[in-house]
Amino acid sequence: MPSRALRAICLAVFTLLLAAAALRSEHVLNPDGVAYIRIGQYFARGDLRLAISGYWSPLLSWMIAVVLRFGLGPLPAARLTMAISAMVYVAGCGAVLRKGPTVSWVRRAGVLIAAVAATSWSADLITPDLLAGGLISIAVARLMAIPGGQTIDSVVAGIAFGLAYLAKAVALPFALLATLAYAILAIRRDRTSASAIIRSASLSLIVTLVVALPWIGILSTHYGTLLFSTSGPINHALAGPPPLERSHPSFRTIERPEAGRITSWEEPSGMPYAAWSPFSSAANLRYQCLLLVRNIGTFLGMLDEFGSSIAILALAVLALARRREGLLPVGRLPAQWFFVPIALLVALYAPLHIDRENLRFFYSLLPFLFTIGMEGIEMLASSDRTGRKIRIAATVAGLLLFAWAPLARLASVLIGRRPAASEIAFEASEALRRNGISGPVVGGAGAIQGVPGLDVAFFIDQPWYGDLPQPSATAYEKSGARIAVVPRWSSVARELGEDARVKDLDSIVFPDAAARTGSEIKLFALPPPAIR
């Protein structure tokens, strides 16, 4: 085991990296982040009417609300919350890895790789995926200990799963399926302890529900029907077959948000989504099956984002094939114990629409992929004819395959990242403040990066009225908004520029010519709506 001094040094370096990444991404904002921050602000001031949402799980917003109470601003509070989430994530990875690789220095390397990955991910987005990933890993590590373990393992697993649900709703069905799966695996491994295993698994599920049920009760009361989340039906609606719309109404309609909100995106549960069922027609069922196959392929391709993990998995499969019983022992456990979380999480997301940008859905799988991959390499490299140096070289090569992508992402965050759309939006917002320009905002959802119109509205604390797939100057002027944010080279930008009633804000927002031409957005002051 590493010394306390070395652990303290690693923790200090990790904390410094998190701080540096947070400072470098101080004004990096994503649409989900806007929703979580705004809901955190509502919780902080006790406005439960606006705070309760079935789409956005509450834990991240609760954490932001606590930090806000200490006087930090909204974005610094969110950044600190993401840093804490990264620490929870690394703790969860460490808990899993202690069940995995038999070589101690490989386990430590895995934790370091997880820390590097978590640092970059904490700066990329403001979402609960890191937090949920860490809590899920903690829970699964405790489930793995249930055979022959203690009551505390079941209790901690249940608490972690319950908190994971409060961070991200998908964790609740995952918890139920994972607990059942590990109970079955444990009984198959030791039938003589079946009754004890069932009691332990049941206790874990009971504790999970005890933690989750209060929020489920609040949501069920709020919406008038029993539910644990509205995100599943909404996300399934977005995965529907053509010609069903695959974007959220908040980003393709112009609508004034509810009083007190800055965007309808803060509560999309009541918006018009086109629900569909794979069982309503043969065509829909065929489409759903094709979507499942496509999503599994997307996931396999996405593994490279974890650091050439698909090659590592291929090695692991080869190693599995070499075993007479078809099972690769991983530390003290069979390999299928580490495949379970991978299979379950992919199965839960497979009916929806996923692409390579949705890597965050699978953050929690890193320690399991790492364990399977590294043990697979160890198996392939271990034979009577393989020398110690060759085994070490193979292990180091595997570590490098896992490490290169997180290191590259971290380097991009710290030294090489181009300005995000939200950072440009922040600069524009500061210019608006300096010049006393304010009012509701419209447009900006069609930009190449992000939703800068929403970002501008957030930074100047004004409502965002949304956008249209095919916007026009007339639609923007009729919206009642006072500021339009549009892609610089778009047709609507030309329309607005040719309208004598509209004021081009380029010289105010981007006084530097180079910054102006380098910006992907353009802002206009719209005329006040005509009184009828």
Image (cartoon, rainbow, N blue to C red):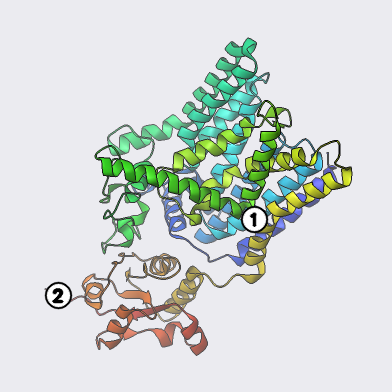
Q: Residues within 10 Å of mark 1 (few under 14, many from 20)?
A: many
Name the amino acid, label 2. Answer: Ile
The residue that disc 2 covers is 531
- Label 2 and label 1: CA atoms lie apart by 52 Å
Q: Report the disc number at residue 119.
A: 1
| Left or right placement of residue 156 versus residue 98 in this view | left
Q: Quadrant of residue 94?
A: top right
Q: Earlier in the sequence, mark 2 or mark 1?
A: 1
Report x, y in % for residue 498: 27, 88
Q: Residues within 10 Å of mark 2 (few under 14, many from 20)?
A: few
Q: Report the disc number at residue 155.
A: none
Report x, y in % for residue 419: 54, 72
Residue 276: in sight, yes or no? no
Q: Do labels 2 and 1 touch, CB within 8 Å?
A: no
Report x, y in % for residue 58: 45, 44
| Left or right placement of residue 296 versus residue 152 in this view | left
Name the amino acid, label 1. Answer: Thr
Q: Secondary structure at mark 2?
A: loop
> Can you say whether 233 is above or below 243 in the image?
above
Q: Which residue does the image show at 71% across and 40% down from the upper left?
A: 376
The quarter in which the N terminus is drawn is: top right
Report x, y in % for residue 95: 68, 36
Q: Quadrant of residue 485?
A: bottom left
Residue 82: in sight, yes or no? yes
Q: Which residue does the image show at 49% across and 53% down from the upper left?
A: 358
**Between tags 2 and 1, which lies in front?**
1
The quarter in which the C terminus is drawn is: bottom left
| Left or right placement of residue 290 versus residue 381 in this view | left
Q: In front here: 55 or 215? A: 55
Q: Which residue does the image show at 53% across and 52% down from the upper left?
A: 359
> Can you say whether 261 is above or below 159 in the image?
below
Q: Secondary structure at mark 1?
A: helix
